[in-house]
Amino acid sequence: MNLKSPTAFAIGLLIAGSIQGAPVSAAVPNGLTGTIKIDGSSTVYPITEAVAEEFGKASPGTQVTVGISGTGGGFKKFCVGETDISDASRPIKAAEIETCKTNNVEYVELPVAYDALTVVINPKNTWATSMTVAELKKIWEPEAQGKIMTWNQIRPTWPNKPIRLFGAGVDSGTYDYFTEAIVGKEHSSRGDFTSSEDDNVLVQGVASDEGALGFFGLAYYEENQGKLKAVLIDDGKDTNGKGPQAPTLENVIQGNYQPLARPLFVYVSKKAAERAEVAEFMKFYLGNSTTLAKEVGYVPLPSAVATLAQSRFNGRVFGSIFAHGGSQVGVSLEELLKMEKTS
């Protein structure tokens, strides 16, 4: 089994069957109290915030706070015991695993949705409606800094206009995944771009500059379609003649949107999971994630993967299913979770 193959992600989705959302459940025990602290990925934030809002309606005695310090920033707090749950747009890294071990923080790793990491341009940009992975690499690789500065350096037929780049903060899992998928090495890119952990800052930057190019999670593009234009992505490996692909739910499900489709996670500490309010919150989260993920613009987990995730939390299976840690392109969550369950 080759978990790094371009089709592995599609296999993991297609085997799982159809995606089915259910109405948001409010089946929460009465009398719950306490505070649940969550921080981490700005990409996962819209899902977690939506869950927290619905949970608050069902359990008004429980206060849920959700921060957006980025995946890396969230793990810095989580692995020293400052937070109960960490949102992450990539798997936990080896160094973060070691920090958690040093501080006796055990955790359950749970996939909650899929994302189509979206490359965006200004609506006035009429030329770069589609790009290849090789062209994106030419723009973003470290060697491009100070050299690749205009659009016609990417394609001669494109205008001699400045490229102004906007991207996720370097403490972000989105940045880690994008660099792994496009440049070929995590945390490796040119440094002369405007970065932010707040995706709304990136939206505003691209929306106000005709020559801008940026990237962030699908939910923020869906929310700002009137201000932005999504670039179709060609991975250069398509043998079916489909050509460049848009970041849509259908393309993620069918495995067409490569290599920028990725899973999203939450990490729950063992200590926090022993508290009734956290256990009930996660039960509520996993029971409603398929519905709420779609509502905020992400791709819900297929039923088979969602069931495996629920089983993982119910059984308090600690640790990561990713042997090497960090961003991994083209993996199949279903295969990894099934391997763990049968080992």
Image (cartoon, rainbow, N blue to C red):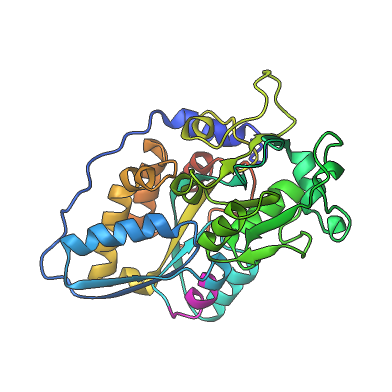
- For the N terminus, give its image quadrant: top right
Residue furthest to the left in view is: 30
Q: Is residue 266 above or below residue 231?
A: below
Residue furthest to the top in view is: 241
In the rendered image, residue 280, in percent from the top left (x then y), is placed at: 24, 62
Q: Is residue 77 magenta?
A: yes
Q: Tell me which residue sits at (43%, 70%) in the image.
A: 67
Asked if residue 256 lies left or right of residue 13, the reply is right
Q: Which residues are magenta?
A: 74-82
Q: Is residue 70 magenta?
A: no
| Observer-nearest of 244 and 211 | 211
Question: Can you tell which quarter of the image residue 155 is in?
Answer: top right
Question: Can you tell which quarter of the image residue 208 is in?
Answer: bottom right
Let me know if residue 324 appears in the view: no
In the rendered image, residue 82, in percent from the top left (x then y), is placed at: 44, 80
In the rendered image, residue 255, in percent from the top left (x then y), is placed at: 57, 31
Q: Tell me which residue sits at (41%, 28%) in the image.
A: 17
Asked if residue 91 lies left or right of residue 271, the reply is right
Asked if residue 232 lies left or right of residue 277, the reply is right
Let me know if residue 186 appears in the view: yes
In the rendered image, residue 198, in percent from the top left (x then y), is placed at: 53, 65
Q: Tell me which residue sits at (20%, 49%) in the image.
A: 25
